[in-house]
Image: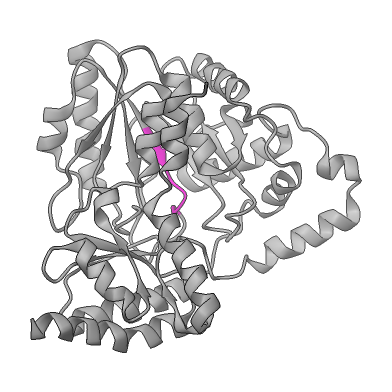
Amino acid sequence: MYSQEMYKYGSQSSVIRQIFAYSQARAQVIGKKNVFDFSLGNPSVPAPKAVRDAYETLLNEMSPLELHGYTSGPGDASVRQAIADDLNERFGTDIEGGNIYMTCGAAAALKIALCALYEKGDEALTLTPFFPEYRVFTESAGYKFVPVESEYGTFQPDLNKLEAAITEKTKLIILNSPNNPSGVIYNRDKLVDLAQLLYEKQKEYDHPIFIIADEPYRELTYGKEVPFIPTLYRNTIVCYSYSKSFSLPGERIGYVCVPPEVVSSQDIFFAVCGAGRVLGYVCAPSLAQQVIKKCVRVRPDVEPYRRNRDMLYGGLTRMGYECIAPDGAFYLCVKAPDGNTERFCERAKKYELLIVPGESFMAPGYVRMSYCVSEDTVRNSLPRFEMLLEEYKEG
């Protein structure tokens, strides 16, 4: 009568969303300021002024048809070229507008890229910890999904484990740096070695192995370099979203980039267009596209996130919590004091602290905290985390 597979995905909502819904309900009872919700990656920092100004200018100066009418399936040509020009200026690449496909955010970009590359029997790898929807996106596209453990305690790629996981059926690996849920940025040396490994495996198996670089947090970094992976490995397809950098998660605007160096680049781009058509992901929101064109060289103000990171990471580590130091994004992985994350998260609720168990990210023993919240939320939560830790010390 209906698809059992789709029922499975629809009836099992993500743990993150469940906790967020709980926080909304608690706020109705005790007031929002009394709930310390670190569950959802929903930016609290306002969109850059240039973005807000662009919306106002466009609404006043462009006709309704220009603002709200259809673009071509892959997106407005001038918007795509503006994005390509910006990437070239920043990273020394030779990307053209014709290599860019506009999407409704990174989720659509990932799903399109995965479907464009899939052939029967393919396997898709990703490094742990990872955004839980990767499993949904890959398995629903037909892949066998293969998580590969990263180095314990740093979450940098473990090349030995990655090499052991690659088989003749490996089509791609999804890389997410800065990483959700850890905030870790993969080191350039690690990525160079990873690229060399993939080149060797391509030669051994006589077929391309792709990297899909999922980069919605590329601009959210606190001083550490975020290597642009297409400059290190030829067969890299980039999926990007402006949701985090421009604080526009509800606008759903991003892109897929298939650089010209990718093997059979033009054919793969046509496959991207075909996947977008089959999935119904054509003509990303027209107004949002025009905003991106005007603001393509605007960078986010990361200082509010930096302050939150320093306050939260510094405060928790001084108390005695073990944390993975985040160099980017706005997430922090904290080790549960006794290793039991479910119990830790439930105990935290007594203090109105809402955090996400790491098991859904394949980060056992850790919880994820999203610190894209107000400074007051971070500051006022710290005494509660101290009381929570004292509870553990008391046994």
Q: Is residue 280 visible?
A: yes
Q: Is residue 191 left or right of residue 179?
A: left
Q: Is residue 140 above or below residue 20?
A: above
Q: Residue 369 location, x and y as percent?
A: 34, 66
Q: Nearer the viewer, residue 20 or 208?
A: 20
Q: Position of residue 309 (x, y in %)?
A: 36, 74
Q: Quadrant of residue 9?
A: top left
Which is more toward the observer, 229 or 370? Answer: 370
Residue 140 drawn above or below residue 40: above
Viewer-proximal residue, 40 or 216? 40
One can see residue 259 in this view: no
Q: Residue at x 48, y 31 (%)?
A: 111
The number of discs equals 0
Residue numbers of the magenta segment: 212-218
Taking the image as shown, residue 297 lies to the left or right of residue 34, namely right
Residue 131: image location, x then y, percent: 36, 47
Looking at the image, which residue is at 89% across and 40% down?
65
User: How are the residues colored?
Assistant: one colour
Residue at x 12%, y 36% (from the top left corner):
161
Asked where in the image residue 209 lies, by quadrant, the reply is top left
